[in-house]
Image: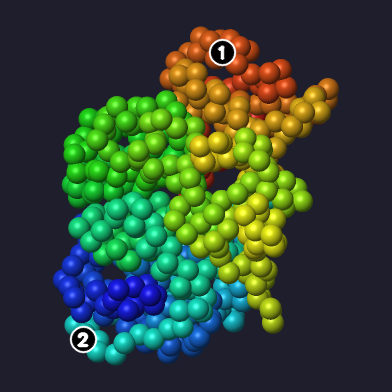
Amino acid sequence: MTASGARNLLEVLQHRMTTNADALAVIHAARTLTVGAWVVATNHGRQQLAEAGVGQGDRVVLWMEPSLEMAIAITSVWAAGGVIVLINTQSKAPQLSHVLETTAATAVIHSIKLPVELPAKVMGLSAAEILPSDDASPVSERFSIDSESFASIVFTSGSTGQPKGVVQRHSTLLDGAHRVAEYHGIAEADRLLCPVPWSFDFGFVQWQVSVASGATLIIPERNDLHSVCNTIEQQRPTVLAAVPALITHLMTGMSPFSGIDKSSLSVITSSGGSLPSVVLAQLIEQMPRGAFYLNYGLTETYRSACLCPEMVRDRPESIGRAIVGVDLIVVDDAGRQVPDDTIGELVHIGAGVAAGYWRGGEHPLEPLLQPIHAKHSDQPVMGCRTGDYGWRDSAGFFHFHGRRDSQLKVMGVRVSPVEVEKMLNASGLISQSAVFGQPHALLGTAVVAVVVSDGGDAVLKDLKKFARKNLPPHMMPQRWERRSALPVTRHGKIDYDALKVELTNG
């Protein structure tokens, strides 16, 4: 519970209305939403959803892009007792159909065209249908929701198979938002620019942090480089939250970032992958007084670790230390903690773990917690196995070695694509790389490297020379490709699947 007595983010918003209803809550391009207008709109949306039949525990899919309307839709569903379901709006008909069926959704609120015709049992509501008229009256009643009830189901993209729905409770979202705001130092006076879709957990967390801290959330008109740079100059954010791919693009190519006025920015926070060392060095050079937070976590764990500003320059290869409320350990396949400097699976113990994966039915959750044998406990403790390989060094810093399901077997030896990428990026010859495997008749799997450079073929020649000097034979790429940019998913991560298809068909 917060100092205001609020037990969930909806109550935090309502408390903020009583203290400063005119405070700017959200800015989207030239449009704004005050705290007071947000609460009024939420009450109207709650009434419209209730009249449409949305009740306690009902799942409501939001087929929307970040906007004032989506902010209102989230709190309206919560006020009606429902659960929001978030999915990437670039998903196709099969993915949306899977989400609708899996969650047994009652309704879909949409602001863009749906790729499927909704089943008869699912209501389709346009965002305009739940918004209030200009003369809507203020509200006096208080919203009341169970803080231990389900708040959200975020569907992860997943590396294989159908996406899974990660379920979080209201209490976990509030606690996580406060913990992130605290260690980032985000407060009411801040203006947080987030060009990341809220269907991606890192983007949704920024929405939560802005509500919990009272900071103003800024949404760019578009997510392209010029729009983000224009927003920085026009809206003067103090915090920029962006995925590594966007930061990389801001620092390279045709981006105007280097020439704009960035003096308002004091914090840059990132998650969703590693930031290439050469890009981080350029960022530090352009913003020598900036505070950089490089975060690690899964949709399932909210946030696990952070490389904080005081260590970014000294340990850029690390994912940092466990954040407050979390114990991060490394275990072997049997779930037993291993010594420092030993590669194993990262396990998250403590705050932030999701309630489970949504499976519906009488027992709707597939649990995430498993018994783990940690050194500090005689009895097994419950932890969330991340599926990520890594290790802890003797100074207590963690290092990411790669996804368990993306490890390659070359010449009978296990290879981490992430480790190869880190080495190639450290050459200083390229700005970004993507490494993955392709079937090979002799090797079993061939290592493929697609690198980003504005230089010519001479860059590849020098890079191969660097790789031969620094990589063992089994990690050496057998195929090299150079690009001016890498394809990215809607969430800003490198689109490895698109690269694999391109190179296979090419």
Q: Is residue 366 visible?
A: yes
In this rendering, the label closer to the viewer, 1 or 2: 1
- The image position of residue 284, as x and y in percent, is 32, 31
User: What secondary structure is marked by label 2?
Assistant: loop
Residue 218, above or below 277 = below
What residue is shown at x 63% (from left), y 66% (from top)? Answer: 357
Identify the residue under disc 1: 466
Depth check: 351 or 269 in front?
351
Instruction: Give whichever of discs 1 and 2 has the lower sequence position.
Output: 2
Identify the residue under disc 2: 137
What residue is shown at x 21% (from left), y 34% (from top)? Answer: 260
Instruction: Count neighbours of disc 1 (C-alpha within 10 A) and say few if under 14, some if 14 to 19, many if 20 or more.
Output: some
- The image position of residue 405, as x and y in percent, is 70, 44
- The image position of residue 38, as x and y in percent, is 27, 74
Instruction: Give the amino acid at mark 2.
Output: Ser
* Chosen colour scheme: rainbow
**Quadrant location of residue 465?**
top right
What residue is shown at x 53% (from left), y 82% (from top)? Answer: 57
What residue is shown at x 47% (from left), y 68% (from top)? Answer: 172
Instruction: Give the amino acid at mark 1.
Output: Phe
- The image position of residue 164, as x and y in percent, is 63, 61
Q: Is residue 402 visible?
A: no
Q: Is residue 452 left or right of residue 26?
A: right
Q: Quadrant of the C terminus?
A: top right
Residue 441, above or below 324 = above
* Residue 305 disc label: none
Depth check: 244 or 40 in front?
244
Q: CA distance from mark 1 to mark 2?
A: 67 Å
Q: Is residue 56 left or right of residue 191?
A: right
Instruction: Count neighbours of disc 2 (C-alpha within 10 A) and say few if under 14, some if 14 to 19, many if 20 or more.
Output: few
Q: Give the farthest residue toward the right.
A: 442
User: What secondary structure is marked by label 1?
Assistant: helix
